Amino acid sequence: MRLSELLCIEDRNSIISIVGGGGKTSTLFTLAGDLKDKKVLLTTTTKILKPEHSRLYDIVIEENSEQLLEIVNSGDFKNHIVCGVASEKYPGKIVGVTPAFIGKVKEAFDFIIIEADGSAGRPIKAPAEHEPVISPETNLFIGLIGLDCLGNAGNDTYVHRPEYFSHIRGKNQSEKITVSDMIKLINSPEGLFKNAPKSCRKIALINKGDLIPSTLGVSLIDQIFEKSIFPIEVILNSYKEKESVLYYRK
């Protein structure tokens, strides 16, 4: 099954925020690619690499958010829109918009998909005090963890913000990451679902499921689902597979 089918993202004016470890940009563009007949805005509230030009997307980058808002709200686009603000400080990247910006453009789109967190390519992340930057109107919140973190040290080779992750799991950075540590990150109010609106649908997307045997993957997802302290859906995912969703608990 494809991720978009499983998530049933069909309701107009859906705002989807994606946070956590590596795989957020792939998730953003995968979801958008499945929504070809919809009006979709792709953006960030942090920073992302400037995407390559594609016939599927119009890339809109302006010097400030006021200019960006005017152009995006014009509605003069045939394709999905990828938008952000240019920055000399971060060459090759586009800088994000604010939650207030999202509120001003939401009526112009069927879906807004936001990369709302940065992880410097690491498979797992614990947010700092200022992270993530979430639109309060988010109704689908996706938190990613890559399985390439399992069994490796919780240092900055595999973890973004390892000092915060160490605090959450109660271990030194040198200690190996376990499934229990992942569950602690998911359940912590300062962890994977930090700043998620209370009423939004919450998805733990456990990515790179191809790295472990299928029976182990099923057991892992079952553990996460059964030990969650709040309503959650858990997906074992791999973008290397034709149908990315390998297992699902709801």
Image (spheres, rainbow, N blue to C red):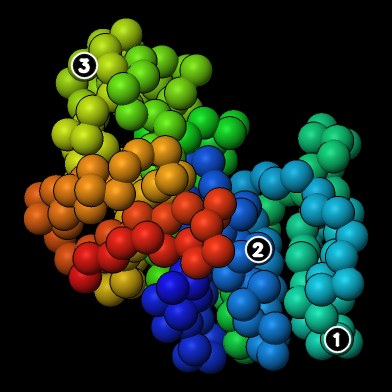
Q: Quadrant of residue 161?
A: top left
Give the Cα distance between marks 1 and 2. 17 Å
Q: Distance between the residues labelled 2 and 3?
A: 35 Å
Q: How far apart are marks 3 and 1 (CA)?
A: 51 Å
Secondary structure of the residue carrying numbered label 2 = helix
Report the side of 10 relative to 37 (left or right). left
Please say whether residue 171 is visible from this viewpoint.
yes
Q: Position of residue 98 (x, y in %)?
A: 62, 59
Residue under the point 52% across and 57% down? 241
Q: Position of residue 139 (x, y in %)?
A: 40, 75
Indicate which disc, 1 or 2, sits on the residue closer to the N terminus.
Answer: 2
Q: What residue type is labelled 2?
A: Phe
**Residue linked to disc 3:** 171
Closer to us: 229 or 46: 229
Which quadrant of the rendered structure holds the N terminus?
Answer: bottom left
The quadrant of the picture occupied by the C terminus is bottom left
Residue 80 point in image, percent of width and height = 76, 77
Which residue appears at 33% of the width and 72% of the height?
A: 200
Provide the residue designation for mark 1. 78
The residue mark sitting in front, 2 or 3, is 2
Please tell me the numbered disc located at residue 29. 2
Question: What amino acid type should be assigned to the residue bearing mark 3?
Answer: Lys
**Residue 96 drawn above or below residue 123:** below
Q: In this view, does 193 lie above or below 198?
A: above
As helix, strand or loop, the secondary structure at mark 3 comes to loop
- Tell me which numbered mark, 2 or 3, is placed earlier along the sequence: 2
Number of residues whose C-alpha sits closer than 10 Å to that of mark 3, classed few (under 14), some (14–19) or many (20 or more): some
> As rendered, which of 234 and 61 lies closer to the eye?
234
Out of 56 and 190, give the one closest to the viewer.
56
